C-alpha cells in the first residue's frame, strides 16, 4: 500500500494488465434494510434515508435515461408491460417492481 511505487518504471503497465485480466468481483443485487430504511437514522426516529432511492434520484439529476431508452440504444425493443420483463428478470424482481411503479 505504498503509492510511491506507481512512479517506478512499468508500474502503470502492470496495473492496467492486472485490471484487464483479473476476474471482477461478483455483484450483489440486494440492499439490506439498514441501507434502504435506516441510512443516517437519528436517535429517537424509527426511520432513516433510503440509499436505493437516493441513487435513483442521483441518476435522474444527472440525466441518465430510462431503462427502455437504454434498451433502444442497444438495439433492443422497448418493454410495454410487466410480463415482457420476465424475459430478462426473475418473477420476484418483476413483482416487486410492479408493486412499486405504475
Image (spheres, rainbow, N blue to C red):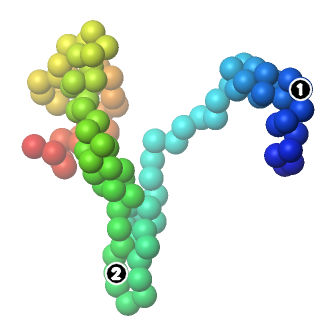
Residue hosting label 2: 46
As rendered, which of 10 and 65 lies closer to the eye? 10
Query: SS at mark 2?
Result: loop
Residue 79 visible somewhere in the drawing = yes
Question: N-terminal of the two: label 1 or label 2?
Answer: 1
- Labelled disc at residue 9: 1
As rendered, which of 55 and 99 lies closer to the eye? 55
User: Along the horizontal axis of the image, is 33 left or right of 85?
Assistant: right
Q: Residue at x 46, y 41 (%)?
A: 29
Q: Residue at x 32, y 50 (%)?
A: 58
What x and y, as percent, mark residue 15?
A: 77, 28
Q: Measured along the vertical axis of the image, is residue 30 above or below residue 49?
A: above
What x and y, as percent, mark residue 47?
A: 34, 76
Quadrant for residue 20, please give it: top right
Q: Residue at x 10, y 43 (%)?
A: 102
User: Along the horizontal axis of the image, is 50 left or right of 15?
Assistant: left
What x and y, as percent, mark residue 6?
A: 82, 37
Within 10 Å of disc 1 (Cα), the crowding (few <14, some 14-19, many 20+) is few
Closer to the camera: disc 1 or disc 2? Answer: 1
What x and y, as percent, mark residue 19?
A: 70, 26
Amino acid at each position: 500500500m505504498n503509492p510511491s511505487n506507481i512512479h517506478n518504471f512499468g508500474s502503470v503497465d502492470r496495473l492496467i494488465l492486472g485490471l484487464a485480466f483479473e476476474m471482477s468481483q461478483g455483484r450483489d443485487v440486494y440492499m439490506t434494510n439498514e441501507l434502504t430504511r435506516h441510512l443516517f437514522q437519528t436517535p429517537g426516529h424509527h426511520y432513516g434515508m433510503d440509499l436505493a432511492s437516493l441513487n435513483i434520484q442521483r441518476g435522474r439529476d444527472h440525466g441518465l435515461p430510462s431503462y427502455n431508452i437504454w434498451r433502444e440504444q442497444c438495439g433492443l425493443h422497448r418493454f410495454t408491460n410487466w410480463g415482457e420483463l420476465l424475459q430478462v428478470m426473475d418473477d420476484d424482481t418483476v413483482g416487486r417492481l410492479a408493486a412499486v411503479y405504475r
